[in-house]
Image (tube, rainbow, N blue to C red):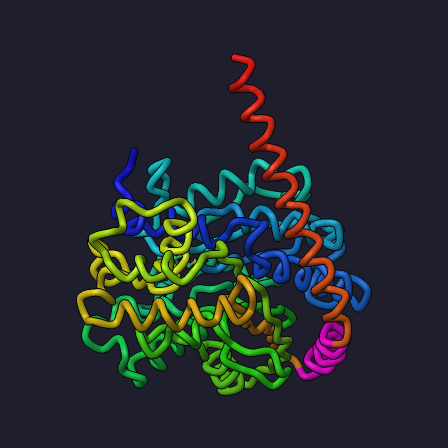
Amino acid sequence: MKKFIDQLRDYDVCFETFLIPSMNGQKHMQTILLRESFKYFSEENIGIKHASPTNILDVSCGRGDYSASWTCSIAKYVSGGINYFCTDIPEGFCKDSGECYIEATKRKIKAVAHILKLCDDPVGVECDLYSGVDVIIPFPKQADIVHWSHSGYHVRDALGPKKNNLKAIEQGLQIAIAKIWSALDEEGLMFSIHQSNDTSDNVPAQMATLARPFTGILDNVPWYIEKNVHSHGGWVTTVHFGAPVKFPIMKNNKWQLLKNPKAWEFLDQDQQHTLRLLNFIAHDFTDENKAGLEKLAESGKLGEFIDIFKNAVQQNSDYIICKCAFQMACKSKIMADKLDTIGRDLRQRMPEFIKEMAETMMSAKKEHSEAVTSLKLTNFHT
Ligand SMILES: C[S@@+](CC[C@H](N)C(=O)[O-])C[C@H]1O[C@@H](n2cnc3c(N)ncnc32)[C@H](O)[C@@H]1O
């Protein structure tokens, strides 16, 4: 069995803990908002093509599980079928299977081709989004829909000593948005979903915002995106949402032990789960031989970091809020007016979406415990 410290040093392992469907509402809410937006687009005849395939470009697609799930949830509104394109960094690969992210994503998209009405083989482009001049969709293709989710924070990764330099960060994001903008068709739509520090809807911003003073993680990528889209002459409509990230319920003495790296190999399951979550929150891709929490321990900030999150979890009685901005951007004013109306509707319907998110988390929990029970029974009988 892998030593616990090796789990912490493995980004995929910690990301997987963060993504557990019964304990994280973020991906459920993203999928709900995408599905509902596509319903409107289909009715309003924007973004989606009905007589020919719609080109979808998934930027920083990752391992492909979420790509397969969100595209399946919108497929029924894209009557002309889909051509799927994706892009991620060459260094991105799945440590368990050894596949690079692009290949893993293409394979997972092909496996659901019948649901997507996939018209052609998926195509992937490996490149760094935040530097250089590579195109992110093969010329002369243009994207009708761009989907860009939870990647903007990584602009800091390659900046070395400049990773907290606001000018360098801004330049990296400018490059990314310029690449996306030139890949986007004149009648196309860009979705961006990133953590935000906005509290205009009175929902607190916790995950990235609490971590920012310790790790420098950006909690304002949506602000940069809006500014850059405007500089290209485009428009943005934003819908904010908060989603819970649940933590195991633990007493203070169990939290206290997390502050001592020497105790990490001897922790119980709840404590290890909590550390993997905190480590995902503290992660950055610089010096990958060390876990984010190890870096915090070295700089003497680990104890304070753990206390800040413990207090938030205990105040909310077992979760923190991951605050996100769901942004829809376009190039034409006519489309922008339609997006504003859709955005208003989505905001008004948020209580309905929160209920669906909570129900999806509950049913994932039930499925999980049924799977565990049947595993136990199978073991019992063999
Ligand atoms: C948190 S994951 C998000 C994956 C997926 N989009 C999602 O929402 O689940 C961040 C993604 O950004 C990608 N990424 C990191 N640095 C990048 C870069 N310089 N250029 C392009 N993608 C990058 C990572 O490889 C990873 O797939």
**Residue 329 in the image: x percent, y percent?**
60, 75
Q: Which residues are magenta?
A: 333-347
In this rendering, position of residue 20 left or right of residue 332: left
Residue 160 to residue 364: above or below? below
Secondary structure mostly seen in magenta is: helix
Residue 274 to residue 363: above or below? below
Q: Which of 126/163 is in front?
A: 163
Ligand 1 image position (quadrant): bottom left
In this rendering, position of residue 53 left or right of residue 191: right
Q: Which of 275/337 is in front?
A: 275
Q: Residue at x 63, y 34 (%)?
A: 370
Location of the N terminus by quadrant is top left
The answer to whether residue 265 is magenta is no
Q: Which of 288/235 is in front?
A: 288
Residue 127 in view here: yes
Q: In which image quadrant can residue 332 be found? A: bottom right
**Residue 169 in the image: x percent, y percent?**
33, 78
Q: Residue at x 56, y 33 (%)?
A: 372
**Residue 225 in the image: x percent, y percent?**
49, 78
The answer to whether residue 339 is magenta is yes
Q: In which image quadrant can residue 3 be found? A: top left
Which residue occupies the extreme right position in the image? Answer: 43
Q: Count how many numbered circles sit on residues in the image.
A: 0
Q: Residue at x 47, y 64 (%)?
A: 150
Residue 138 in view here: no
**Residue 380 in the image: x percent, y percent?**
53, 18
